[in-house]
């Protein structure tokens, strides 16, 4: 009702302005000159009138002005600025092309007006990285990595070296919505976190939303990582790739039909395992993936796209077992232009995550996974230069496979077993408005109405008082309740349904030409849960839907920030503070076993969590030395109280640190152009040690030393820090055609810091006493890679 009244007010306020004088619309697309690749976020500015707009995710823009002759500036970072004179005496549809700048970045002209738009925009808590920036950041084993790059931004951390996923503002990895061409990626890591699943050569645009999340996104309560692939070159054939010590990649693109259709095909693979037999090692660990995209322009109003991703990891130890897991996504999209002011996108998406385990030594195979089928329809309505609307709907069907066990040999003593499959529907409708209220005040507001239907399944357990977890007052512990029966439902039935209204609002107030303050509020719901009682996700972790015994997570997040540009936009400063409150955060009773557990509700309690902090990002945008300083001061806590006065709750019902709590997180990233041939890059990281639980004493029982553990996550691993360096050598920097190449030399962890990934405690068999063992994954690692383009 509130949103409806606001929209009515918006239309009323601007109706007179719209019709008081003759007005016409300039609309169209912005393309890269050499490939016809659409460009996202290009500025289309009317500098004398101090108004403008940017291209959307598909390169489309629309702006309406009074009748007249105008100077239009089209600018995009890394491309030559274009200035056109437009006579608006009728609606005009026009395609602009931009040439990539062949000069160094400090010579690229970015107008003052472009940066003013950034200051005025209500969008906050959002970071963007280009593919070229990602490829310059030094990483382990020399492989450019999207996930490692975003962990250098404020509010984003990893769970440690060799750990999967990433954590945003004190949230868990499953609270991040990861999208590749709008398709959900359920596991973002290769080789247990050493690499990410994203090929940087195939990426066109990347945005990470930590807060101020638009209403078109939903289903997660921490962040949205939205990644779009390139569409392919519809003018000429092009290829680029790289050769490294442990992996290589190749991407090819070209026209299906010149100026109308294009293809893109990219592949990566690691091959370090091929050298292991030299050292008499029979273990195997490698990954491979494939990115593909087809695009075709049917006519001036219709474009279609077909994109996909397929990736697999393979890990085995001798002949004992083999582990295979990975993602598969396919997306068909149709862009349609209803008018010069209404742009639509329809998507039909399939996403799948598969996990397989062949245990040869016990003669059985294990398979599990999750898949969804997603229909999306989104429209963007350019009502006026002061009001833009985006609205649409989304419907997803989920299938959850918690696990299947099959004997692998005729003589196996294992019986075939299927854990109970689960099904669900998640639906949403939304409306977003971007509203310029005055010259100084701009707002973005909207609402998302989401629903979740847990569909019928076989063998749903029944418990006394619908309580699957009971408290034993004698031993002061939680225990699994006994089932008193089961009930089965047809898949078409609904076991449990949820509905939530999720309002969003963000405001930006311009203090002066170079600074502004912004504030935002998000309410979001998450109906899926990744069941994991480790500090970082593992491929074996299982996704579970909300239902009769598991409630959806509900988020309220508040943020306020100050933003400023310095010295003609050579420097920029962003300072934000935030507070997050999450209800129904899953917690686990002590001694929980999640593997092959067909009654997961018997080890789960619903608690709550909170996170708050201060983020600072200082960027140097121009000159030979560029980079940023990122600092986060934060707290992330969880609490699960007793449900009755006699229950103790988890950790005696007190707040305790989540595994993702990092009090201090500092990142410094820098690049320095020595000359046209040599570019130096470096990054330094410091993080407070990860929370963990240590023994605080021990006692002897029947001659055995038994440790007594402290409160949950009350102690920490040692602080984490390291320094990485890389140097890029380009033999022929002025060569713009034919074979172009460069060499990248890197050193990861320059001073060989042995950062603790974990500290475990066990009994020394010789002395009989308990002792600590520290595990460090990486020391100093040199790397070299060769990149090429033709």
Image (cartoon, grey):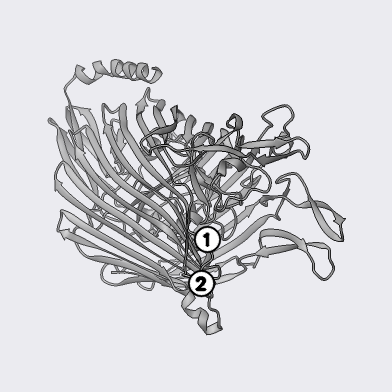
Q: Relative to 358, does residue 134 appear above or below in the rendering?
A: above
Q: Could you say where residue 130 lies in the image, as x and y percent from the top left?
A: 40, 53
Q: Relative to 92, does residue 331 appear above or below in the rendering?
A: below
Q: Relative to 470, does residue 148 appear above or below in the rendering?
A: below
Residue nearest the viewer, comparing 774 with 650: 650
Q: Residues within 10 Å of mark 2 (few under 14, many from 20)?
A: some
Q: Could you say where residue 484 lies in the image, as x and y percent from the top left?
A: 58, 36
Q: Earlier in the sequence, mark 1 or mark 2?
A: 1
Hey, which quadrant is residue 123 in on the image?
A: top left
Please say whether residue 101 is visible from this viewpoint: yes
Q: Could you say where residue 165 lies in the image, as x and y percent from the top left?
A: 52, 52
Residue nearest the viewer, comparing 6 with 267: 267
Q: How many marks?
A: 2
What secondary structure is found at the residue carrying circle 2? strand
State the residue at coordinates (18%, 34%). Answer: 338
Instruction: Identify the residue under disc 2.
Output: 783
Instruction: Identify the residue under disc 1.
Output: 192
Q: Relative to 131, does residue 94 appear above or below in the rendering?
A: above
Image quadrant containing the N terminus: top left
Residue nearest the viewer, comparing 468 with 511: 468
What secondary structure is found at the residue carrying circle 1? helix
Hey, which quadrant is residue 377 in on the image?
A: top left
- For marks 1 and 2, give the one nearer the viewer: 1
Question: Any mark on residue 786, and which?
Answer: none
Residue nearest the viewer, comparing 593 with 261: 593
Please say whether residue 121 is visible from this viewpoint: no
Q: Could you say where residue 542 lies in the image, as x and y percent from the top left?
A: 51, 50
Tell me: 115 left or right of 159.
Answer: left
């Amino acid at each position: 009702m509130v949103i409806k009244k606001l929209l009515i007010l918006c239309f009323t306020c601007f109706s007179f302005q719209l019709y008081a004088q003759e007005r016409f619309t300039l609309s169209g697309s912005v393309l890269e000159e050499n490939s016809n690749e659409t460009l996202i976020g290009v500025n289309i500015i009317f500098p004398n009138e101090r108004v403008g707009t940017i291209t959307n995710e598909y390169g489309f823009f629309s702006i309406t002005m009074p009748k007249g002759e105008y100077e239009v500036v089209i600018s995009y970072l890394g491309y030559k600025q274009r200035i056109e004179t437009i006579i608006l005496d009728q609606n005009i549809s026009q395609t602009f092309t931009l040439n990539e700048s062949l000069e160094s970045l400090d010579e690229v002209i970015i107008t003052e007006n472009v940066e003013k738009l950034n200051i005025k925009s209500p969008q906050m808590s959002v970071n963007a990285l280009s593919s070229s920036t990602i490829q310059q950041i030094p990483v382990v084993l020399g492989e450019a990595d999207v996930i490692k790059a975003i962990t250098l931004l404020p509010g984003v951390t990893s769970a440690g070296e060799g750990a999967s996923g990433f954590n945003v503002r004190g949230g868990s990895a499953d609270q991040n919505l990861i999208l590749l061409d709008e398709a959900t990626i359920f596991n973002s890591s290769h080789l247990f976190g050493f690499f990410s699943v994203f090929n940087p050569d195939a990426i066109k645009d990347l945005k990470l939303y930590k807060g101020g999340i638009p209403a078109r996104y939903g289903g997660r309560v921490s962040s949205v990582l939205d990644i779009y692939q390139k569409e392919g070159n519809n003018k000429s054939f092009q290829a680029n790739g790289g050769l490294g010590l442990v992996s290589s990649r190749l991407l090819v693109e070209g026209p299906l039909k010149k100026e109308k259709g294009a293809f893109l095909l990219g592949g990566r693979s690691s091959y370090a395992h091929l050298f292991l037999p030299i050292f008499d090692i029979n273990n195997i660990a490698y990954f491979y993936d494939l990115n593909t995209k087809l695009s075709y322009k049917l006519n001036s109003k219709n474009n279609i796209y077909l994109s996909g991703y397929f990736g697999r990891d393979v890990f085995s130890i001798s002949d004992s077992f083999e582990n295979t897991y990975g993602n598969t996504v396919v997306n068909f999209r149709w862009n349609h232009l209803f008018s010069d002011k209404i742009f639509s996108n329809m998507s039909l998406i399939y996403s799948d995550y598969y996990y397989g385990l062949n245990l040869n030594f016990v003669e059985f195979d294990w398979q599990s996974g999750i898949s969804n089928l997603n229909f999306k329809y989104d429209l963007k309505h350019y009502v006026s230069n002061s009001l833009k609307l985006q609205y649409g709907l989304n419907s997803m069907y989920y299938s959850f496979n918690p696990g299947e066990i099959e004997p692998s040999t005729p003589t196996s003593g294992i019986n075939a077993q299927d854990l109970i499959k689960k099904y669900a529907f998640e639906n949403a409708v939304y409306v977003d408005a971007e509203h310029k209220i005055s010259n100084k005040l701009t707002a973005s507001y909207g609402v998302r109405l989401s629903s979740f239907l847990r569909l019928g399944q076989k063998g749903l357990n029944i418990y006394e008082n619908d309580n699957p977890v009971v408290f034993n007052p004698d031993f002061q512990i939680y225990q699994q309740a006994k089932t008193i029966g089961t009930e089965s439902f047809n898949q078409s039935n609904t076991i449990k349904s949820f509905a939530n209204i999720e309002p969003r609002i963000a405001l930006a107030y311009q203090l002066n030409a170079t600074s502004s303050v912004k504030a935002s509020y998000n309410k979001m719901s998450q109906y899926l849960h990744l069941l994991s009682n480790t500090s970082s996700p593992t491929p074996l972790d299982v996704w579970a839907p909300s239902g009769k015994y598991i409630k959806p997570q509900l988020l309220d997040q508040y943020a306020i920030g100050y933003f400023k540009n310095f010295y003609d936009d050579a420097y920029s400063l962003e300072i934000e503070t935030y507070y997050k409150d999450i209800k129904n955060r899953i917690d686990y009773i002590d001694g929980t076993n999640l593997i092959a557990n067909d009654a997961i509700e018997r080890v789960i309690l619903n608690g709550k969590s909170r996170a708050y902090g201060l983020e600072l990002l200082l960027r140097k945008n121009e000159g030979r030395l560029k980079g940023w300083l990122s600092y986060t001061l934060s707290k992330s806590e969880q609490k699960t109280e007793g449900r009755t006065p006699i229950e103790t709750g988890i950790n005696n019902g007190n707040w305790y640190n989540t595994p993702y709590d990092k009090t201090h997180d500092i990142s410094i990233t820098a690049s320095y152009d020595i000359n046209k041939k040599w570019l130096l890059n470096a990054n330094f990281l410091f993080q407070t040690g990860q929370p963990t639980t240590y023994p605080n004493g021990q006692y002897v029982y029947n001659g055995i030393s038994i440790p007594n553990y402290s409160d949950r996550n009350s102690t920490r691993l040692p602080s984490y820090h390291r320094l990485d360096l890389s140097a890029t050598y380009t033999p022929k920097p002025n060569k713009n055609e034919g074979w172009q190449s460069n060499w990248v030399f890197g050193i990861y962890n320059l001073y060989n810091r042995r950062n603790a990934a974990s500290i475990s405690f066990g009994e020394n068999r010789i002395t009989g006493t308990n002792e600590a063992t520290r595990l460090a994954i990486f020391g100093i690692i040199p790397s070299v890679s060769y990149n090429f383009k033709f």
